[in-house]
Image (cartoon, coloured by chain):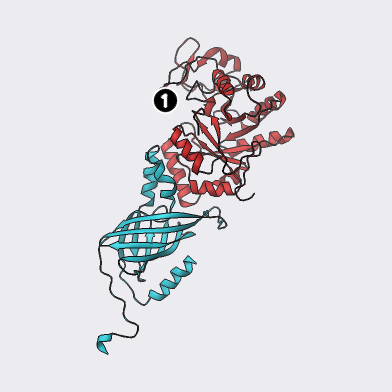
Amino acid sequence: MGWFGCAWVLVGCQAGSEPLLEAHRTGAGYWPENSSYGLKQAMNEGYDGIEVDVVLTRDLVPVLHHDPAVSTEHCRTASGGAVPKDTLIRDLTYEELREGFLCGGVPLEEFDSAVVVAEPIASFDEMLGLLRDVAPAGQLIHLDIKQEPSLTLPPAVFAEAVLSRWYDAEVPQPMHVSSNLPDVLQAFREEGAVRGQSVETTLIWPRFPVGASTSAVALQREGAILSGKEDYVDLVTQAGADNIAINWELASKHLLTMAHREGVGIMLWTPNDPAVMRRLARSWPVDVIITDYPGEAL
Amino acid sequence: MIGALAAGGLLASVAWAAPVGLDRVDVLSEDPGTFLDEHVARWGPSPTVTSIRFAEQLKVVIRTPVRHLHLGLSAASQSLVWEPPLRWGLGLTAGVQTRWALPRGGVLGVHYRRGPLRFGLSANLLSGATWTRGDWSQWRVLPGVGVGFGPARKEPAPPHVWGDPLRR
């Protein structure tokens, strides 16, 4: 890997070029996250990329949802009631999930100008259909695998269910897989190899385990970086990944610069302030910015 | 080169042992140089993390027994810096900086000292070396600005190497 090299094999990033903008959870600042509505809009808008979260149902159907459990914040039961806490998606069949819940119909304070549309949870197959029929061929698809030990099915089951559908669909869009767990990335690379495909993988950092205090996790990771016990290149190497996706607030520009020079693809999540995005695009070594507002000009 | 400068300074000044004690506290540290480069601009949109990064670079500077050789300790950087005075309050700044005892770069610049105030301008030569990845092949040069406060003191004049002229 050379000076200012880049592992971004599918898109072919170059140092000094403007970073790509990925629609975080299909563009949660504009419409319901991970929704069919959001997917169609983001595809029609032709954003550089779309990031979606993937969870697996009991009958091994991948669906687009951020958490291992049906969101109590974004979703309601089909009859309009509150979603019981800890309704794990791995315990429901796809039909039960689709018939039992509507998501996206709840206005959110965080995204108060976003469109509010209640829909059943979108399936991965729906997304593949839209990729064939609606999306530009070059639109980068980012699959963030929400495998969570003890709350979801194992990594290998995710990899088989997701990649079999992806490659069978023969969609033209480039794709990469991300996770905050190296085991998940490994499972996807292995499953890809079985299918004769090279799966590009991205390590998400830091990992915020479900239910953990984000402040405590952030402070721990800050200490590890500060003391030199953790290093972005080392993290990516250990995970066997091509890229690293880092929380923009916690990121060290210095260490990112070093990683970028080593050929690691750099993604930052989730700056939403246009001025911040422009500053990052101008002066940071970043290949992809993942944002809830991908329509903002850099 | 910076290491050699610091070592040279150490040898040149070792004869003039100085009392150990607090030299100053830097509210803005010249090393490692990352605060100005990447954090200041994030203060508005990310005040909590930036405040933590600010606290990490606050540096206590201690005088060592070796004259003009100072030990700087902050969470972000630990440095050994030679700071001999030149004239008109100006002085040289040259030293090595570490990440928790792992050498990772150097600092070279000038400083101005008047009363309790110390103001410094320097260039930081910073590698990407960490304890998990001892790689000194990649370097960046970052500007450093230092603002520190410490007890005002009068530097004792160094002895003339040819003896005291009044005794001749």
Q: Quadrant of residue B107?
A: bottom left
Letter of the red chain = A
Read off the residue under disc 1: A110
Three-letter amino acid code at the position of disc 1: Glu
- The single residue placed furthest to the top in the displayed view is A79
Is residue A291 placed above or below A252 in the rendered structure?
above
- Can residue B43 be spotted in the picture? yes
Q: Quadrant of residue B148?
A: bottom left
Closer-to-camera residue (B115/B87):
B87
Residue B87 at what x, y percent from top left?
32, 69
Residue A83 at what x, y percent from top left?
47, 17
How busy is the neighbourhood of tag 1: few (under 14 within 10 Å), some, or many (20 plus)? few
Which residue is painted at 41% across and 63% down in the image?
B80
Relative horizontal placement of residue B157, taking residue A120 as reference (left or right): left
Quarter of the rendering occupied by the C terminus of chain B: bottom left
Residue B65 at what x, y percent from top left?
35, 70
Disc 1 is placed on an element classified as: loop
Relative horizontal placement of residue B162, taking residue A53 as reference (left or right): left
Task: Please give the chain letter of the residue carrying mark 1.
Answer: A
Q: Quadrant of residue B71?
A: bottom left
Is residue A103 placed above or below A172 in the rendered structure?
above
- Can residue B103 be spotted in the picture? no
Task: Count every numbered label the image shows and give the total.
Answer: 1
Residue B21 at what x, y percent from top left?
30, 65
Q: Colour of chain B?
A: cyan
